[in-house]
Image: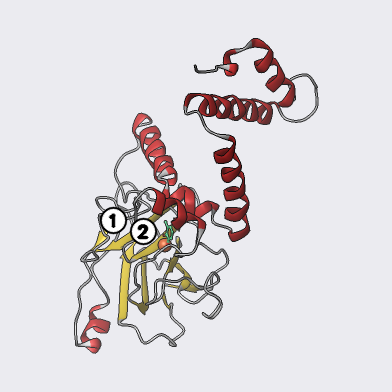
Amino acid sequence: MTIKLSSSESVQKFFQEVSGFNNDQGSQRMKKLVNRILLDTIKIIEDLEVTTEEFWKAVDYLNRMGARGEAGLLVAGLGLEHYLDLLLDAQDEQAGLTGGTPRTIEGPLYVAGAPMSEGETRMDDGTDAGTVMFLQGQVKDAEGKPIAGAIVDLWHANTKGTYSYFDTTQSDYNLRRRIVTDSEGRYRARSIVPSGYGCPPDGTTQEVLNHLGRHGNRPAHIHFFISAPGYRHLTTQINLSGDEYLWDDFAYATRDGLVGEIRFTEDAAAAAARGAVDRFA
Ligand code: MBD
Ligand code: FE
């Protein structure tokens, strides 16, 4: 016998009251959203016959997730952040906006306010004995015209796959920089080759992934925000080719057009003179 209280008029009226429909304070948008979430929740409880034990486990999970600050990590792992990109892509396509470097997710590890420099920078503080990495690129508009004065905001992990600020053993803003593009729209950075990120094994995101039979790893990658006055903001990444997780990314952030061919060389001087790994524009 299945019980469907969710379709009962008195229960629907009750949740309208809960959602503030019977007062004229607050926000109409919030009332609408909260009411829909409550109705969908009770529908899930009924359709999937969620037990009270499962319900309270979920409440406890939310408390533990919040205490660890892992909500952003969970929405990445559940593909919801990637879904938002698919939605924006579809909107752009409908509006006839195509071409250019694809967007991909920001993830939960950006920190605003990184040191800013003109044209080029060094990103690492020199304490991590990683492989030296040169990267360079050119910011162009939709017609291919270089954009001078654009801000390229870069952030990536260290050789252990951890990010400064979240990993408090790293110096402030280590591997986080903003570069203003030069007169040709170019930017150059010296850094160290990052390792892939892995969800904290004792955390609440990995806990869900374990229940789903999934790992919590990302390929090595470099995050980018690109912005310039009069242009739309771009959030994207380079994911490094050759990484075992390149197309097995727990956050679904690797996309065609966002794979960076990293070239290794023993000749540091030549690499520095040549400028960088392959162009990214
Ligand atoms: C990361 O470094 C990341 O880029 C994403 C999307 C999710 C978790 C960690
Ligand atoms: Fe990342």
Asked if disc 1 is less than 8 Å from ligand 1, the answer is: no
**Residue at point 43% right, 77% down?**
123
Please state if 28 lies on the left or on the right of 271 as rendered.
Answer: right
Q: Determine whether the residue tagged by mark 2 lies in a helix, strand or loop.
A: strand
Asked if disc 2 is less than 8 Å from ligand 1, the answer is: yes
Marks 2/1 in contact by CB < 8 Å: the verdict is yes
Decide: few, some or many residues near mark 1? Use Cα within 10 Å; few <14, some 14-19, many ≥20: many
Q: Nearer the viewer, residue 54 or 163?
A: 54
Q: Nearer the viewer, residue 241 or 91?
A: 241
Residue 237: give its label: 2
Q: Quarter containing ligand 2? A: bottom left
Total numbered labels placed on residues in the image: 2
Rendered position, 190 above or below 51: below
Write down the residue under mark 1: 258
Q: Can the viewer see residue 194?
A: yes
**Residue at point 37% right, 49% down?**
103
Q: Quadrant of residue 192?
A: bottom left
Residue 138: give its label: none
